[in-house]
Amino acid sequence: MPRIHFHPARIFVAWPCLIVTVFVASSIPQPRLNGQTDERVIVKDSREIKASEFGFNIPDGPIEEFAGKNIATTDEEGHGCVARVYVKIGDNFIVLLPDGQLVGRTADKADPTDRAFVPSTQDEIGKSIAQGQLNGFRILKTERFLFIYNTTPDFAKVTSTVMETMLTGVLAHCKAQGLEVHEPEIPLPVIMFHREEQFQAYGQKPPGVLAYYEITTNRVVLHEDSMFSSFDQKLARQDLLSTIAHEGAHQILHNIGVQQRLSRWPMWLGEGIAEYLAPTKPGLKFAWKGAGKINDLRMWELEGFLQKQFIKGFHGDTVDQTVNAGVLDSTGYASAWTLTHFLAEQRKEDFDRYMRYLSRMPPMQGMLPNREDFEKGQKPTVPGNMVHFKKFFSEDLNAFENEMVTHMAKQDFDSPFGGFPHFVCTVEIPGVSGSTKHACFYLDSNGVMEWQTAVVESLSAYDKEHARFELSQYKDRADANRYIKKWKREK
């Protein structure tokens, strides 16, 4: 699930849009234990996903839960194996191979068997992956992960430490939420390339993608190069580790029983919870901060957005757009993290209840964009997301958004760009009872100009004529902040 990546002058995003047929289910979900029942539980307002949408080589058809059954088949290398039935689709199957991959098998290639399903070992998975393009890659085994890499050894070590620490912490966090979790059944593979061109040769992705998690193969794939490399090495490492942790969070959640593989949660929560669980901290030794700690990169972007939005006011529009979104832009990812952080910290009981509700969503079901939006060339929306949001959290989006902004404005964070020069824009609007003052600071002049435009649009014709704007530049964020505070105190 590719994640947005930051650059001070540009932001990249990549998300594979999933188009599905419309099938609205209305039955009420009953308790479900991680697929260990033959009864298919339907989450209200979700839709059915066709096998073809995930690229499985089996015909589409009626979907059934078929847990607890094994078949004799072959793995992707043609070797005989026992696979576990994950989903039955018509007369055919999606099965879990011993190495953790989900693949399609037609009925003629799936013979029922009483033989046990035996997960592959780390050595077996490593040998299977480290061939072809990956021939000669080193292998690093940790307790629950398997890293296949040609990166620098230090990078591999840092990555493995972050991932293992995060898995332990995420397990504990989810247990505290009342979610039924378990250790990963199969070792979790992470494929790491030193160079971006090697990464792209393995699986072509849009420019700017540093890492992704594949639901079908159950692998995280990443590269060590960073778009920040020519800009600032520290930022390059921070952005890269943050991205890796984000994709690792997706992999972890899909393997500890929280989110069923091949299910699709609301975009805002699916991406927001990955951000919430995956903050990292820079320094001599990069490390996982802990679930719920402030994500500095997201908070930095949120700060810029809030400066403009404070001028326009908060009327619930941001929450509405974020929750309804079928795809997220850069601001949408920051907003999704903001929503998740606020709910997890300030509406914990409701948030934990919603997480437990969504954990019941079975494979081949999800909260998905309307096909009609794509056909009309419109920004994809997911109306069912808002139905859920209002049911579990709030009908009054205006009040909710203002409460959320107040909460986030109180959070301290370490700006990743704090040491860089900042532009400051001030505006003073004369009035009968005294002047009104507004100010902002941004890393680049484009942010300042957007903020100034928002201010001008909010003014009356008279105020536009008399407002006094000034633009200046300061050596770093702290210096810019000090100037603004001093300027606001002046009469």
Image: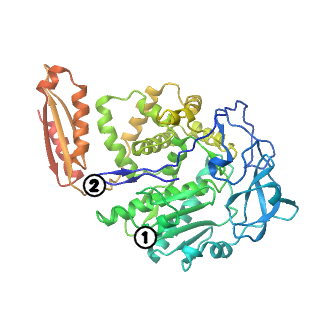
Disc 1 marks which residue? 195
- Percent position of residue 401, x then y: 43, 31
Amino acid type shown at disc 2: Gly
In the foreground, 365 or 307: 365
Give above or below for 332 relative to 159: above
Looking at the image, residue 268 lies above or below residue 465: below
Q: Based on the displayed image, in which of its 4 quarters is residue 127 positioned?
A: bottom right
Task: Pick the residue in front: 433 or 372.
Answer: 372
Q: Quadrant of residue 194?
A: bottom left
Residue 262 locus on image (x, y percent):
65, 49
Q: Can you see residue 338?
A: yes
Compared with residue 252, is residue 132 higher up or lower down, i.e. above or below?
below
Residue 111 relative to residue 168: left or right: right
Color theme of the render? rainbow
Left or right: 226 as drawn, with respect to 249: left
Q: Position of residue 224 (x, y in %)?
A: 43, 68
